[in-house]
Every structure is written in C-alpha cells, then in structure tokens.
Image: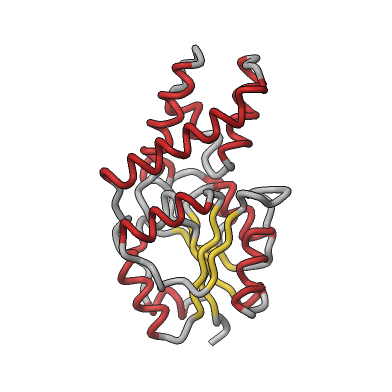
C-alpha cells in the first residue's frame, strides 16, 4: 500500500459547519454595518477567521482594533450553533472505519481553533478517532499554506508523500498539494462542476463515495 496515513480537514468535510460559519459571520458583520452575501463569503472559505476578517475589514474600512473581539465573537457563535444543531457529514464514520481497519494512521488538520475542534469531538463522539490533531490557529500562515498538513504528518510519523488527504475547499486543496500529499476533494454540491477542482487527485460528490476501490485506483 502506497499510503499509510489519512488526514482530514474538518469544517465542511467532517462536519456540516460551513452554514454555521456563514450564519455567525453574517450576524457579526451585519452588526458592523456590512451585508455579507453568501457568494462573497464563499470566496474566503478555508481561511482562518482572522484572515477572513482582515480581508473584509480592509475592503469595508472597518476599524482594525475591533478585529480580535470580532474573531472571538464569531468563533463562540459557531461553537454554540454547532452544539445546538451541528451534525456530521454523510459517510464520515464509514470512511474512518474503513481506513482505520486498513491500518491507516488518522489525522485531523484544520484552520479552526482548538475550542471548536474540542466542541466537534465532544458533540459528535469522535474522540479517540484521530492520532494527530493540528490547528492552524496559531501558525504564521494558514491554508493554502501547507504547514498545518506537514505538522500533522510529522506527528503521525509519516512522510508527506505517503499521506492521502480529504478536503472540501479550494484553499485546503492547494495546501494539500503544496504539502506533496494526495488530495481527495469533496466540493459543495453547487461548486462541484467547477474546473478549479481538477488540481485534486480525486473529486467525489460525498465521503460516502470513497471506497476501497477508489483508494486502490490511485
């Protein structure tokens, strides 16, 4: 087997949290006098909240001294929303069972803060499923920089070229490829037709479509 580790993104890939991030971001931005529509929000999916805010604060000339408090506000709103109505994406438990049963080392590499990771693990009961968990929260650069993936592979003790990674965002896909890892991308249904996903090694409609046959086809 050419792969010995599988590394997963979290938001939009393992958990159905992107709508919650959008709800929280729009609520907070509305309080700041900005109407952030879904199309505009989609252009920044995969960035850390700080980078997301730096982008939109710059465009709308919002006082940068409000950035950290706004970042904290959005994160806490997402955590509350996820605890209230968050759910796993289809196929998550099955793909984790498949890969762990094949002897894969399993990691999680996300742009989200550790507070949301912990809430996700507790709410979904996925504690103990990941041998390595890395967050880009305090790294110098987030996705599309590959560091969060490289750090996860290092903790797992697996060379990058022996890792297969699962992503749902463009920025995440670029991070995986920059890390010299193989990428399975699961785009949002309304974006799956876009040519940008051709950079990925595999494109699937859902994690439920990832099977041993797909793995063997690499």
Image-based side of 97 in relation to 25, left or right: left
Residue depicted at x 65% and y 17%: 63
Q: Residue furthest left?
A: 85
Image-based side of 79 in relation to 137, left or right: left
Percent of width and height locating residue 194 = 49, 43
Q: Residue furthest right?
A: 140
- The image shows residue 1, relative to residue 86, as above or below, that is below
Question: For this rendering, which residue is in front, 61 or 118?
Answer: 118
- The image shows residue 123, relative to residue 49, as above or below, that is below
Residue depicted at x 46% and y 80%: 216
Residue depicted at x 53% and y 49%: 113
Colour scheme employed for the rendering of this structure = secondary structure
Question: For this rendering, which residue is in front, 194 or 172?
Answer: 172
- The image shows residue 28, relative to residue 186, as above or below, that is above
* Residue 92 placement: quadrant: bottom left
Percent of width and height locating residue 127 = 38, 68
Question: For this rendering, which residue is in front, 35 or 64?
Answer: 64
- The image shows residue 128, relative to residue 176, as above or below, that is below
* Residue 22 placement: quadrant: top left
Q: Residue furthest top?
A: 33
Percent of width and height locating residue 6 = 51, 72
Question: For this rendering, which residue is in front, 35 or 62?
Answer: 62
Image-based side of 64 in relation to 112, left or right: right
Residue depicted at x 42% and y 86%: 102
């Amino acid at each position: 087997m050419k792969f010995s580790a599988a590394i997963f993104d979290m938001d939009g890939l393992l958990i159905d949290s992107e709508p919650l991030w959008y709800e929280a971001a729009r609520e907070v931005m509305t309080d700041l006098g900005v109407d952030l529509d879904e199309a505009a929000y989609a252009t920044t999916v995969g960035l850390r909240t700080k980078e997301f805010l730096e982008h939109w604060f710059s465009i709308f000339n919002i006082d940068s001294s409000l950035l950290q408090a706004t970042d904290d506000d959005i994160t806490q709103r997402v955590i509350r929303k996820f605890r209230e109505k968050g759910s796993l994406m289809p196929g998550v438990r099955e793909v984790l069972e498949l890969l762990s049963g094949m002897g894969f080392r399993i990691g999680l590499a996300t742009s989200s803060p550790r507070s949301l990771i912990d809430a996700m693990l507790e709410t979904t009961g996925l504690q103990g499923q990941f041998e390595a968990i890395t967050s880009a929260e305090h790294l110098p650069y987030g996705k599309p920089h590959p560091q969060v993936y490289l750090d996860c592979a290092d903790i797992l003790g697996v060379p990058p070229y022996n890792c297969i990674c699962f992503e749902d965002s463009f920025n995440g896909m670029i991070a995986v490829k920059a890390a010299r890892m193989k990428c399975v991308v699961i785009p949002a249904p309304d974006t799956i037709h876009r040519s940008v996903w051709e950079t990925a090694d595999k494109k699937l409609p859902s994690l439920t479509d990832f099977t041993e046959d797909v793995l063997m086809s690499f």
